[in-house]
Image: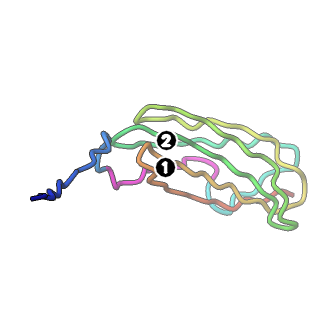
Amino acid sequence: LLVLTSINCSKKNGGSDDRVAPVITLSSPVQDQTFTGSQPVAITGTITDAEKIAEVHVHISNTDNGSLLVDIHRYPGTGNYTLNETFTIPANGSYRIQVIAKDNSANESRTTVSISSS
């Protein structure tokens, strides 16, 4: 007599059930702000998460021709991160700054501002 027993296995992932994305608060620049060409532009703000912020990406692109000008990657590993980056804006163009933050549970948030130079 052969008895087959089915055992239900449960898998614990060891992580949290975090489903909340990091919160990005961009202080500067502000939407539609205009700068003088060759002027340094400060990108500042805060990023917070209930767990840990795994990655922060800052992408700056020229919206006139689609080229990527700056691609910054940071790996804070904390629940609070102060964003403080600077780039020199080229003259006579329109640009998009996108900040992307991901936490350890792969939750992601994004914020974007458009700026220009004369």
Q: What residue appears at the point 78 percent right and 40 percent down from the top-left corner?
A: 40
Q: Are marks 1 and 2 in contact (CB under 8 Å)?
A: yes
Magenta span includes 108: no
x%, y% of residue 76? 52, 32
Tag count: 2
Instruction: State which quarter of the image contains the C terminus.
Output: bottom right
- Identify the secondary structure beneath mark 2: strand
- Identify the secondary structure beneath mark 1: strand
Extreme residue toward the bottom, this view? 64
Q: Check residue 84 in the rendering and tell me which mark sits there, or answer none.
A: none
Q: Residues within 10 Å of mark 2 (few under 14, many from 20)?
A: some
Given residues 80 and 117, the one toward you in this image is: 80
Indicate the amino acid at tag 1. Thr
x%, y% of residue 58? 66, 47
Span shown in magenta: 18-29
Instruction: In the rendered view, tell whether residue 66 sits above or below residue 108.
Output: below
Q: Is residue 20 left or right of residue 116?
A: left
Q: What residue appears at the point 68 percent right and 55 percent down from the top-left corner?
A: 97
Q: Check residue 25 in the rendering and tell me which mark sits there, or answer none.
A: 1
Q: Is residue 16 left or right of residue 91?
A: left
